[in-house]
Amino acid sequence: MLAFVYVASFVVGAWAPFVWAHREVHGVVNPAHLALTLFNAVNVLICVWEHALFLHRGKIKREHARLKRKHGDRALPKPLCLFEHVSLSRALSYEHWSVIWSQYALLDPSYADQRSFGFWIDSGNGVVTLPATLLLSHAATYAGKNAYFLSTEAVAVVGIVVNYQMLYGTVLYFCNYALNGYARGASNASVATVIVANAIWIVFPGWWMWVCWDILTKDAFTALR
């Protein structure tokens, strides 16, 4: 089965239950809730991949060197790993998904170097933001119906802090990418891939921070209802 099918299934599995529960609990489908919990589901996937980044950093470095010799620098291989066939047992392993970073490192070699900022900001993100992301999706779905154990203020503070961390880290990542000249010699498509993939972690954390500020000041999840 294509790796992309496993990826899509994981994201839907981390998103659809919250969408269904929100409809059951509150009787509506809220566009902001849909979009923000979808982002959270994608972030959960990225967190899992970031675990692989740390756990298999040696393999990533070796595979990146092999890919660089085969495909050159500043260009993604064809087909991408997401469009290759993968067995279920491989798809369930951290080791397999380390290939994501070996290939992405062709655009930004930071991910094949455990001494780099990119390596540490992303591997750290996988540990720090995973529980907070699940907390936010749960609170955004159930809070306000006596089905949650934290106050709205506490949830809002967690949301602001963790999303600020993601936004700040992404801005620094872009600065690192630009100042180190990783875009030089890359195709427009490769640069666009980096920009679009990372801009998501500016737009949606910014949106989450706005929603969490609204929750904090109004003591209610109005924007998500």
Image (cartoon, rainbow, N blue to C red):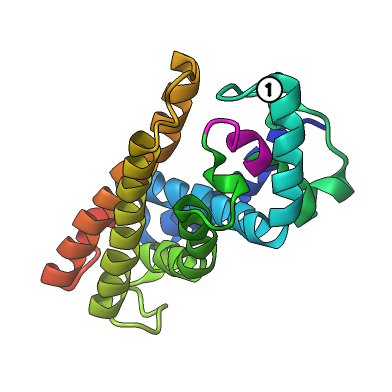
How many marks the image carries: the answer is: 1
From the viewer's perspective, tell me whether residue 158 is left or right of residue 134: left
Q: Residue furthest top?
A: 188
Residue toward you, 114 or 4: 114
Taking the spot 45% from the left edge, 31% from the top edge, the residue there is 182
Residue toward you, 194 or 39: 194
Residue toward you, 149 or 71: 71
x and y percent of residue 50 in the render? Answer: 59, 55
Splitting the image into 4 quarters, where does residue 78 fall? top right
Is 65 covered by the magenta stretch?
no
x and y percent of residue 104 in the render? Answer: 59, 36
x and y percent of residue 205 in the render? Answer: 31, 52
Quadrant position of the N terminus in the picture: top right
Is 106 covered by the magenta stretch?
yes
Q: Which residue is mark 1?
A: 77
Residue toward you, 106 or 127: 106
Quadrant position of the C terminus in the picture: bottom left
The segment highlighted magenta reads 101-107
- Does 174 appear above or below 80? below
Q: Amino acid at mark 1?
A: Pro
**Residue 165 visible (yes or no):** yes
